[in-house]
Every structure is written in structure tokens, then in C-alpha cells.
Image (spheres, helix red, strand yellow):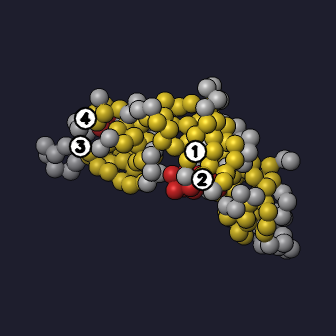
Amino acid sequence: MLTASEFKRAGRIELEGDPYVIMDVHFQSPSARGAATLVKVKVRNLRTGNVFDRSFKAADKVVEAEVEMRPVQYLYADDDGYHFMDSASYEQFTLTADALGDDAGYLLEGLAGIRSVVFKGSVMNIELPQSVVLRIRDTDPPIKGATAQAQTKPATLETGLVIQVPAYLESGESVQVDTREARFIARAKG
């Protein structure tokens, strides 16, 4: 059992039978005497991917989610969903597009660094690496004579994901993308 005052970013807790990861923690001190410190957290359900805010009193006790992280390899996608293979046991499993949510936009065959989130013997979801390299499939031509201000334009990546990239990038170039915020990090080699 954890108390809410022990919450940390990236910690995992169990609420109403589902595992959650803590995305952000904020401690709010009371202004009135005798009032309890509030702990405000932003959590993401590891089964559904839903994100919401929740408040706890610092002394509230919460069950720490016992999740196992296993390395997996992304194989392919078809009408049934997205297929993965456990790197240790070679067992295959499928997750639906609804279960993956936005994470599906980062999946390429052979992508390394993916881990499955296993809770009570069932694969709930996957955890992507913090960044991935994807090729720009389509974007507007580079803007000549751009001003000193940083200008961006939309770019469609090879997986269908659309992000904002600097105006100087062209179709066919590779970019490093932050998987948590769906944003451009840097131009990638290759």
C-alpha cells in the first residue's frame, strides 16, 4: 500500500481494479488550519488509455499496481488488430486499435524498445520508447526566405500520423518524434 504523499511520476497504482500510470503529480498545501494536504494527479488507465485527473488526501492509502513489463516486438497489423510477439516466450498477442489509441501511429515493423504491460496475467497495453524515428511521407515544399521566427507546417509520417515539423523539412526526410507528446524533436539521419 502507498499513501498519496508517496506518489511519483511514472508510478503505477490500482484504482477500481484497473492499473494506472501517474503522468503528473501536484501537491497542494492547505490554507486553512487543520486541513489535509491535497495530492492532485493526472493518471492514464493502462487498459483503456483514458487520461483523467484525480485528487487524494495525502494520507489516503492506494494499492500499488503489480504490473510486469516484458519486451515485445511489433509484427504487423491486419483487420483483427495489431500483432506483437513476446521477445522471451515467443507468444503472440493482438491489441485492437481502440486499445492502442494514438500509440498505433508510431508502430513500424521491427521497432525496438516496445514493452508490454502485463497485469494479472493479461496484456493490458504496450509502452513505447520515448522517441521513434519516422520518415515524412507527405508535406508542403520548404518555405524559402522564412523569417527569423520558427515556422512549422503539418507533415504526414509513414505510419499516417500527422505532426508539426519545421518549415525547412521535405518529404522523404526522417525525423525523431516524441511518442508522449506527438511532437518533432530533431531531424534524423537515414
Residues at marks 2 and 1, CA–CA distance in whole angstroms: 8 Å
Task: Please tell me which of labels 1 and 4 falls first in the chain.
Answer: 4
Q: Which residue is mark 4?
A: 61
Distance, label 3 to label 1, CA atoms, is 38 Å
Is the residue under label 4 in contact with that under label 3 (CB below 8 Å)? no
Would residue 143 be found to the left or right of residue 117 on screen? right
Q: Residues within 10 Å of mark 2 (few under 14, many from 20)?
A: few
Using a 10 Å C-alpha cutoff, classify the residue at mark 1 as few (fewer than 14 neighbours), some (14 to 19) or many (20 or more): some
Q: Is residue 82 left or right of residue 155?
A: left
Give the x, y percent position of residue 54. 32, 51
Q: Which mark is residue 171?
A: none
Residue position marked by numbered label 3 in the rendering: 57
Q: Looking at the image, is mark 3 or mark 1 earlier in the sequence?
A: 3
Q: How many marks?
A: 4
Mark nearer the viewer, 4 or 2: 2
Does residue 102 appear in the picture of this structure? Answer: yes
Q: Quadrant of residue 84?
A: top right
Give the CA distance from mark 3 to mark 4. Answer: 9 Å
**Residue under circle 1?**
94
The kind of residue on which mark 2 rests is Asp
Per the rendering, the mark at residue 80 is: 2
**Residue 114 seen in this snapshot:** no
